[in-house]
Image (cartoon, rainbow, N blue to C red):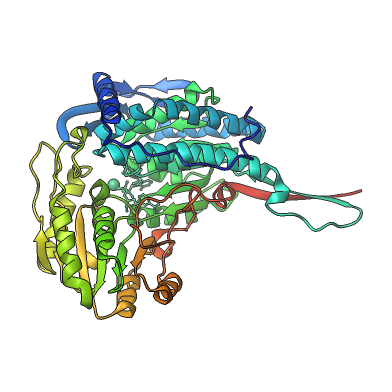
């Protein structure tokens, strides 16, 4: 048992430097190994049972469409119901397992994932189209989440640190955070390991059992995590793995009377739909379902005339085009004050043109987008952008046997343009000119979302003002708006970006528990 885990400070998993030849070779080796194992049949996990179904989800490499990652069995409603019954009965035993023991499964999983991190990253490179650094950061975040939440349940178990109760003579008063019940976990594909792992382990280490419905484009990497939890001896039935269609299995489970909570990360549209489903009570339901929903963003970077313009341009390009702009935190808007507008725009154009598109497994900086639906949607937004701004670079599909799109920059976009308002979720940056920093902040705030933002300036007073007035869950100064670190930058957004659950923070596990007060007369 890891007795010191809640004493030593938490340290983030370091990122691998792939400019070193030995690290690059280690990843290439992992990719070859993973490639030699592709194309297998992947089962559902329902309690102890592995279920192979006739109908499957064929997971393909979005950067190399001929390459099948795996044939993933697909749950329907009867199988989802079976998994629900198992989760309900397993909850009765799992909730009695002491927090320390529950944490121990996670500590073991973190250790194993750390040992095999390139293998996890390699599968993501092939299944989701991440380049080496993006995949490595995803795996590092997954390891961090597992380790962090294991430590957190130990901290919460020492209840007085969270909420010391006032002493009352003649009474023994205690507050205990107990688990909720069965949770439905619905992650997105864009952090196909980290978010899936974080949402699942937080729920489970808090004493709940779950039905994990992975995103349909990245079920193989989700399964690799589920297999790891099985390997460390997590009791069967605690995590039930049921890939399937959001509309069919998702709706069935979110409206199920035995569902106690739903933890969702994905688009605004689906999040709002689930919120409605969760609000309705069905026959036999004896609770209000708890919903944790983290949704989309239309994040942006504000640059004033006192800023370090090279640093600002680099941050704009990294935030807009990291993983092809497919991050909820992606800086899809840049708002630049008039005095330095032309200079910054020129630098952004130059840096963007260096991003060559190509195969993720060869570590090109610009890979494919996730699937045909995204590809079509993004190209459609590029058409819209052509009517709303000046196309500076990109604007077309890129070469390759996959969903490649050139990193695209539009300048002179008006604040109310669609490409300034709507989440595109692809490699498209809209740049807008503001007369001064105050107007720039107003434009930044003029959105229904509120996830991440950055302000670039060297003026301390303005920085103070920006810290107060830029309205988003994660606000950064003089750095990019992507790349939140577990424990350091608890993550979640305002308004239509979600319930601001602050994943990777000290409030997060409480969302998966309910507090019980007991007062005993002495
Ligand atoms: P999505 O289309 O909303 O899907 C998210 C998940 O919901 C998937 O597992 C999907 O399953 C499932 N789903 C779809 N319809 C459902 C239904 N009716 N009932 C239950 N589940 C349903 O989002 P995405 O395309 O995977 O991810 C991109 C979005 O996620 C972006 O908007 C991004 O900003 C957001 N995101 C937010 C955060 C954050 O922390 N705020 C982090 C990452 C991503 P299928 O795959 O089977 O459709
Ligand atoms: Mg989707």
Vertical relation: 481 (above or below) 9: below
The percent coordinates of residue 200 (x first, y second) are 48, 39
Q: Quadrant of the N terminus?
A: top right
Q: Please give the name of the residue rendered at 40% of the width and 70% of the height, measured from the top-left corner.
A: 470
The percent coordinates of residue 270 (x first, y second) are 35, 53
**Residue 251 sits in quarter:** top left
Please name whichever residue, 496 or 285, is drawn nearer the observer in this view of the structure. 496
**Residue 494 sits in quarter:** bottom left
- Residue 389 lies left or right of residue 90; in this view the side is left
Q: Please give the name of the residue rendered at 15% of the width and 33% of the height, measured from the top-left corner.
A: 65
Vertical relation: 42 (above or below) 446: above
The percent coordinates of residue 19 (x first, y second) are 26, 36
Please name whichever residue, 194 or 308, is drawn nearer the observer in this view of the structure. 308
Q: Please give the name of the residue rendered at 34% of the width and 37% of the height, measured from the top-left corner.
A: 136
Vertical relation: 24 (above or below) 487: above
The answer to whether residue 200 shows anywhere in this view is no
Please give the count of numbered marks on the rendered protein. 0
- Residue 137 lies left or right of residue 185; in this view the side is left
**Residue 124 sits in quarter:** top left
- Residue 167 lies left or right of residue 89; in this view the side is right
The percent coordinates of residue 497 (x first, y second) are 39, 60
- Residue 484 lies left or right of residue 4; in this view the side is left
The answer to whether residue 114 shows anywhere in this view is yes
């Amino acid at each position: 048992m890891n007795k010191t885990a809640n004493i030593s400070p938490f340290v983030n998993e370091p990122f691998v430097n792939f400019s070193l030849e030995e690290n690059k070779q280690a990843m290439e080796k992992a990719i070859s190994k993973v490639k030699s194992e592709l194309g297998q049949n992947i089962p559902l996990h329902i309690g102890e049972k592995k279920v192979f179904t006739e109908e499957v989800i064929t997971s393909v490499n979005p950067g190399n469409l001929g390459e099948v990652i795996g044939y993933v069995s697909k749950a329907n409603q009867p199988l989802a119901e079976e998994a629900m019954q198992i989760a309900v009965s397993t909850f009765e035993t799992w909730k009695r397992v002491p927090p320390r023991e529950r944490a121990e499964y996670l500590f073991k999983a973190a250790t194993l994932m750390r040992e095999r991190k390139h293998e996890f990253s390699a599968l993501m490179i092939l299944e989701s189209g991440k380049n080496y650094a993006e995949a490595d950061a995803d795996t590092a975040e997954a390891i961090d989440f597992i380790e962090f939440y294991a430590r957190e349940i130990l901290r919460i178990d020492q209840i007085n640190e969270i909420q010391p109760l006032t002493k009352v003579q003649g009474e023994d008063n205690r507050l205990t955070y107990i688990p909720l019940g069965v949770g439905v976990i619905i992650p997105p594909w864009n952090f196909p390991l980290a978010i899936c792992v974080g949402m699942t382990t937080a729920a489970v280490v808090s004493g709940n059992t779950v039905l994990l419905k992975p995103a349909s484009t990245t079920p193989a990497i989700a399964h690799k995590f589920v297999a790891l939890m099985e390997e460390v001896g997590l009791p069967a039935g605690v995590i039930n793995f049921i890939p399937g269609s959001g509309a069919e299995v998702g709706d069935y489970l979110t409206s199920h009377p035995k569902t106690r909570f739903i933890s969702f990360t994905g688009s605004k549209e689906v999040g709002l739909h689930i919120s409605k489903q969760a609000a309705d009570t069905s026959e036999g339901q004896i609770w209000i379902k708890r919903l944790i929903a983290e949704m989309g963003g239309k994040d942006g970077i504000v640059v004033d005339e006192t800023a370090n313009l090279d640093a600002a341009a680099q941050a704009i390009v990294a935030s807009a085009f990291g993983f092809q702009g497919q991050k909820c935190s992606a800086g899809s808007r840049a708002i630049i004050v008039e005095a330095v507008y032309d200079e910054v725009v020129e630098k952004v154009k130059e840096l963007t043109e260096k991003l060559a598109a190509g195969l993720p497994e060869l570590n090109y900086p610009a890979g494919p987008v996730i699937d045909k639906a995204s590809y079509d949607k993004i190209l459609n937004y590029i058409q819209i952008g052509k009517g709303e701004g000046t196309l500076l670079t990109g604007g077309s599909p890129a070469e390759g046997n996959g969903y490649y799109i050139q990193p695209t920059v539009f300048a002179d976009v008006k604040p109310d343009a669609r490409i300034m308002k709507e989440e595109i979720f692809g490699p498209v940056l809209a740049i807008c000119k503001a007369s001064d920093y105050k107007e720039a902040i107003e434009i930044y705030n003029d959105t229904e979302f509120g996830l991440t933002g950055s302000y670039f300036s060297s003026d301390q007073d303005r920085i103070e003002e920006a810290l107060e007035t830029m309205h988003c869950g994660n606000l950064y100064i003089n750095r990019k708006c992507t790349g939140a670190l577990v424990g350091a930058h608890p993550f979640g957004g305002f308004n239509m970006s979600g319930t601001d659950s602050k994943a990777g923070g000290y409030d997060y596990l409480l969302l998966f528990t309910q507090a019980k007060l007991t007062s005993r007369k002495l």
